[in-house]
Image (cartoon, helix red, strand yellow):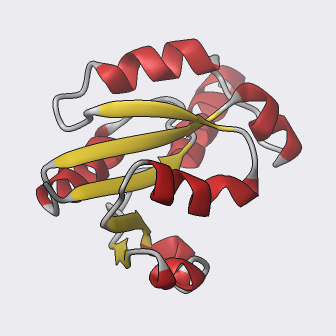
Amino acid sequence: MKKVITYGTFDLLHWGHIRLLERARELGDHLTVVLSTDEFNRLKGKEVFHKYEQRKYLLEAVKHVDKVIPETTWDQKIIDIQSNDIDIFVMGDDWKGQFDFLSSYCEVRYLERTKNISTTYIKQQLAGSAQS
């Protein structure tokens, strides 16, 4: 069985997220999503709309996702890859080159981002409509 892993916050789950998960899952037989906890997001300076448990619940309902585990530090990726027998690490191409150091442990792939959609864009649109 070929196992794939990806990481993210997945706040305000949208079709760009689903497309990434679908393409990641197509690379293997099993997809693990490592979801940033609320505490870790705060350390990264990110403010989320949905709490960790809500985001986890949504991801577990997505047919492409087989397993969701928490991300609590930047440094856990090697341990996650080894302890979950991962074959392929996947991230959006906005991270291109940032995780090449993981190629000693598994294949590293960067997938093209879905154009014209992002959580940041949604938040900006909602903030703009709230001001109108």
Q: Quadrant of residue 41?
A: top right
Q: Is residue 61 left or right of residue 108?
A: left
**Residue displayed at 46% across by 75% down:** 105
Which quadrant is home to the N terminus?
Answer: bottom left
**Residue displayed at 27% across by 19% down:** 61
Report how many numbered discs are placed on residues in the image: 0
Q: Quadrant of residue 68?
A: top left
- Residue closest to the eye, 77 or 21: 77
Percent across and percent down for residue 111 are 33, 71
Percent across and percent down for residue 6 are 42, 54
**Residue displayed at 38% across by 54% down:** 5
Which quadrant is home to the C terminus?
Answer: top right
Q: Is residue 130 left or right of residue 12?
A: right
- Residue closest to the eye, 92 or 40: 40
- 50 up-or-down from 28: above or below: above
Percent across and percent down for residue 126 are 58, 29
- 7 up-or-down from 132: above or below: below
Q: Is residue 80 visible?
A: yes
Q: Quadrant of residue 38?
A: top right
- Residue closest to the eye, 116 or 86: 86
- 118 up-or-down from 107: above or below: above
Q: Is residue 50 visible?
A: no
- Residue closest to the eye, 104 or 57: 104
**Residue displayed at 24% across by 50% down:** 19
